[in-house]
Amino acid sequence: MGKIRASIYLSLDGIMEEPGVWHMPYWDDEMANFQSEVFYPSDALLLGRVTYEGFAAAWPKMKGEGADEMNAMRKYVVTTTLEEPQWNASFIKNNIVEEVIKLKQGTDHQFLIYGSGRLIRTLMEHNLIDEFHFMVHPVVLGKGKRLFTEQDQRDLKLVGVKTTSTGVAILSYQPAK
């Protein structure tokens, strides 16, 4: 059965919105190495529409390490509004939970979610995410979209901790069974 891992940049106060604006001062070789450890074993991306649109606008123009792999990787995008799949994507338009269950059951692939807060919350509600990687940055933003809401209470089991020289805590969790 396939596995789904979610990899998310967060501020100390749980904000995930627009990480491109605030996370770059904390990027270092340790973060790059961790991202490689998460990305390269993955067979496909599973993305929400907003994350997909941002990635699809940026990645095809990029060169260098990881760009060819990112552009070639299969993408499954949850959307009700997009019509024409591009950038090696397939759309999941209806029955999100059922379609993701089919994806997981039909393969032994590793699926990776970047960003995509609403998608993460939906899949978490149905116990479909196998591992979470929270990259908690030493910054308090005070406002913005939070990853979790009051309705998202779940018990998780810590399975890994790394810290970077810039103060980012990389916390890996699995659902508590």
Image (cartoon, rainbow, N blue to C red):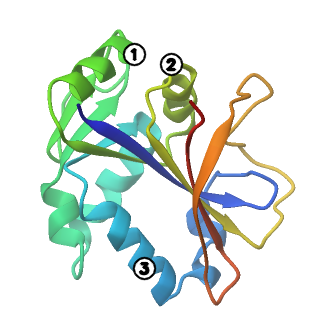
Disc 1 + disc 2, Cβ < 8 Å? yes
Q: Earlier in the sequence, mark 3 or mark 1?
A: 3
Circle number at residue 97: 1
Vertical placement of 124 versus 70: above or below?
Answer: above
Instruction: Identify the element where label 2 is drawn.
Output: loop
Q: Residue type at mark 3? A: Ala
Position of the C terminus, as image quadrant, is top right
Query: Mark 3 = which residue?
Result: 32
Mark 1 belongs to which amino acid? Val
Percent position of residue 128, x then y: 43, 27
Give me the disc on residue 115: none
**Percent coordinates x, y for residue 156 in the rendering:** 64, 40
Could you say whether the residue bearing mark 1 is in a helix, strand or loop?
helix
The residue lying at 37 percent from left, 45 percent from top is 53
Amino acid type indicated by mark 2? His
At 46% from the left edge and 88% from the top edge, which residue is drawn? 29
